[in-house]
Amino acid sequence: MVPKPGTGVDFDPSEEEYLKRVKEMIGDDSLPVEVLGVSKWYINETVAEYYSDGGNIFCLGDAVHRHPPFNGLGSNTCIQDAYNLAWKIAYVTKGQADPSMLDTYSAERQPVGHGVITRANQGLRDHIPVWEALGMMEDSLKVRKKQFTELSQATPEGAARRARLQAAIKNTEHEFHGLGIEMNQRYESSAIYLKDEGPRPPLPEDPVLEHEITTYPGSRLPHAWLNTRVPGKHLSTQDLAGHGTFCLLTGIGGDAWTNAAKEAANDLGVAISCYSIGWNQDYEDVYFDWARRREVSEDGCVLVRPDRFVAWRSKAMIPDSKEKLFFVMKSVLSR
């Protein structure tokens, strides 16, 4: 339970009062308890306007986005901040990317932080109609009991209150089933190559609940189950990507992309893992998941960053594949 809106925080219980409440919650008066320290927790809805200062200062985690734990987004968002920044620092440190690429960290992650703190606090607000339907928002204990009793009464007032409770609880699915808020992160920066794309398709009708599965650059690489020609353990497209390197996925007819990636990797001094997915290729698209989700033809390609976000894609094979991939890689690395 959280305090009612407007409830003050100007209270200072004694240690004895804290101990009494702790034992009440535990349900055992005889248990020895020692209070080592007390601090007040405040509900926050705060996100930093920028996560880096253009130099060597980078902030992440709760230092730049503070919010209540609704939707359970806090730890994931902190880890994602680090995941986004770590590979970029590694590439810059190794001389594989220009230091200016580090500016993309704030550009990509700050909008995510803003969306997360907004959603988390809306998750808190979504519970208020539940409390109202239960009769918990009234100051008077007598009124609260009366409203709560209505829930079990065969009266128009009882039916209306039960309907409000049902609708209010359904709306909390945005907290408990909010796959979209976790997965529909969209990056836009110089580390994403968009010049070959048209306007981005709109998000799903309910972007909090529904996951947008797409290879549009700046999106998470879609998951698709794969296997080997001699069936073994299932693995995902997510397993092929990452591991500290760029990854290029193609299919039947995409040999030129594989050759282009090898030459680009050699010229730039950057590792690019290459895999062909499809019938009798490096990996089999056993359930045709990848065919449905790749949004490029078999001889097209999807270039994935070390953090498993799509950097660029080609809808089909092109005559100047080597030059194009080399140019895209240089653009993404700010070289």
Image (tube, rainbow, N blue to C red):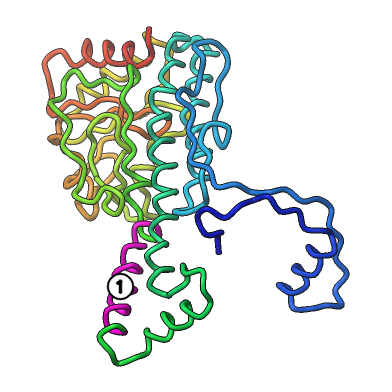
What quarter of the picture does the N terminus occupy?
A: bottom right
Instruction: Give the residue at mark 1.
Output: 164
SS at mark 1 in the image: helix
Q: Is residue 192 left or right of residue 11?
A: left
Name the residue: 47% across, 48% down.
73
The span picked out in magenta is: 158-175
* Residue 203 location, quadrant: top left
Q: Main secondary structure of the magenta part?
A: helix
- For this rendering, which residue is in front, 153 or 300? 153
The local crowd at label 1, few if under 14, some if 14 to 19, many if 20 or more residues have their Cα within 10 Å, is some
| Image location of residue 82, percent across then percent down | 53, 32
Q: Quadrant of residue 160?
A: bottom left
Q: Give the percent coordinates (x, y) of residue 179.
A: 34, 53
In this rendering, is residue 21 above or below 224?
Answer: below
Q: Which sits in the foreground, 8 or 127? A: 8
Q: At label 1, which amino acid type do we have? A: Arg
Residue 279 seen from this side: no
Q: Residue at x 42, y 30 (%)?
A: 109
Dividing the image into 4 quarters, which one contains the C terminus? top left
Q: Nearer the viewer, residue 77 or 335?
A: 77
Left or right of 311 on screen, residue 137: right
Residue 173: quadrant of the picture = bottom left
The spot of residue 6 in percent (x, y) is 52, 53
Residue 297 lies in magenta, yes or no?
A: no
